[in-house]
Amino acid sequence: MSSAGVVLTDIRAQTIALSGITLGLTAPEVQELTEAAAAGAVSPLADKIVNLSVKLGVTQGAMRTMLATVGQADVPDERLVDKLAEVVAQYGKAADAIVALRPDNPVAHEHAVRASEAAASGDRCEARHHLQAARAAAQAAAERALRLAHEAEEAAARQMMQAGQAVAAEAELALSSLHYAEAAHLFGEAASLMPCGETHEKGVLLWRQADALQRWGEERGDNTALREAIALYGLAFDHLPRELVPFEWAQAQNDFGAALSALGERESGTERLNEAAAAFRAALQERTREQTPLDWAMTQNNLGVALWRLGERESETAHIEEAVTAFRAALEETKGEPPRLWAMTQMNLGNALAALGQRESGTARLEQAAAAYQGTLAATSREHSPREWALAETNLGCVLARLGERECGTARLEEAEAAFRAALEERTTERGPLQWAATLTNLGTVLRTLGEREDGTARLEEAAAAFRAALEQRTRACVPLQWAATQMNLGAALSALGEREGGTARLEEAVAAYRAALEETPRERVPLQWALTQMNLGTALETLGERERGTTRLAEAVTAYRAALAERRPEQVPLDWAMTQMNLGSGLIP
């Protein structure tokens, strides 16, 4: 149940204050004044109105208007004083608000002044008219300002985009000078200048920045640059959605896979290579053979490279066989055109065939690989494509060396040596330190094989020097797997030298090199390379054991051979298995 309100009905003369306004009037007096104001009062009531206006600080016109307002309202007698006080107080607030108006717009300002004058004179209607006009003028000015601001914002965005495009053009110019790091920095600046609404343009610039970093990282051995490129491709995909730009997305996926493949080749694990294969397969969903046959062939080639690299690190050959299939499919679409794509795919086919031939007892695959490389060289001009030509020479040298190892003579080995030396004329430390180191390592390997078939040690010493020089670029931090392979090759050269010397210093160095290589050659990641290193370690330990009185070294050699046989199985690598079995038998003879 609600409580009843209290109504004050005492109309005795007293001072009533409301909202800070003191009238000093009774209700009958207010009623009399309101009636007089409505009727056009004359003295003495007119004098009372004048006095009240003076007391309240308002004009007579305003006072009459306020009294008329109360008089025209349906106000109970007992509330007349309070209601007049309320009207007076609110009038004061309205007057103050109007006076406070300081519009910047000149039209609105003029109307505000007139509204203040009208309110002061008591002409409320006129005051409201001018206030409405002031509002309309100010609102129109605001809308014009907003429109101009929007136009200015659009103009600023256009200018920022044009600034970004200018920086991007500078980046492309830097690429033409092979300044990859500088170009990457400029592409990044260009992307940062792109307005928020230019999502596609920003995505393309991030993509170009990643491409430049990939080139730098691949050619200069900078793994940090490759990792940065991989991260940038991820950002680019956020701005290049497959559903909106499927072909650009597919191209970016292809480039993303290339960066992953390059980094994966240098790392000992297979995670990056698997990610690369996944990226290439994703690209092939949009780069179909029917729609874009050459793009499809290029990505098939790249997929084949990733699969070949994966297969090199596995005991099984499934990935390598899959790579051969991918390369041959790509070659069906190129048919010699464009020449560069055909030549590179032909060379990659040779790589996969060589990897398979290395694990087989026959030489058919190796011969096919040699033919593939020779086909590449026939289609590659050293003058116009020195980089590709040198790579083909290097790969041809590798397969010739493999063939030479299985033959009694040295003709193939000498051909391999000539191929490597020719490649080194183009593959210099300045142009590509890692590529130079790879070819130098291959040269060292064939020199070691030749040296093992000669009486002297000159070739072996040259081989050891080549491996040590290559290790200056093939560092453990940068390319751990390649570092380990070169350490193993250095151990093989030192072991061969040690076998021809009376002491044990070279053999001890060889053992140290093999053990160091095993630290970066985990069995679970690269089982065949691990097994090869174990076998070579066993050979060096066996030679040391033969020169010592105890059997500790011989026992270690047997352990190493048996470890190698765990991965060198007859059904997978019969020749390597047979060689290791023979070494194990030698180590077991008391």
Image: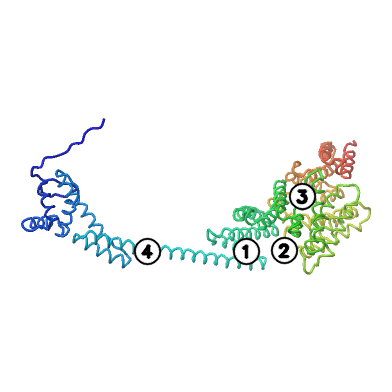
Q: Amino acid at mark 2?
A: Arg
State the quadrant of the C terminus.
Answer: top right
Indicate the secondary structure of the residue bearing disc 4: helix
Q: Amino acid at mark 3?
A: Leu
Rounded to the nearest angstrom, the CA distance separating label 1 from label 2 is: 18 Å
Rounded to the nearest angstrom, the CA distance separating label 4 from label 2 is: 66 Å
Q: Which label lies toward us, 3 or 1? A: 3
What residue is shown with label 1? 183
**First-in-chain label (1 vs 2):** 1
* Residue 359 to residue 120: above or below: above
Q: Would residue 101 be found to the left or right of residue 476 on screen?
A: left
Residue at 25% across / 64% down in the picture?
Answer: 113
In percent of width and height, residue 15 lies at: 11, 46
Q: Which label lies toward us, 1 or 2? A: 1
Rounded to the nearest angstrom, the CA distance separating label 3 from label 1 is: 31 Å
Foreground of the two, 352 or 207: 207
Q: Which label lies toward us, 4 or 1? A: 4
Indicate the secondary structure of the residue bearing disc 1: helix
Q: Amino acid at mark 1?
A: Ala
Tag 4 and tag 1, C-beta contact below 8 Å: no
The image quarter in which residue 60 lies = bottom left
Rounded to the nearest angstrom, the CA distance separating label 4 from label 1 is: 49 Å
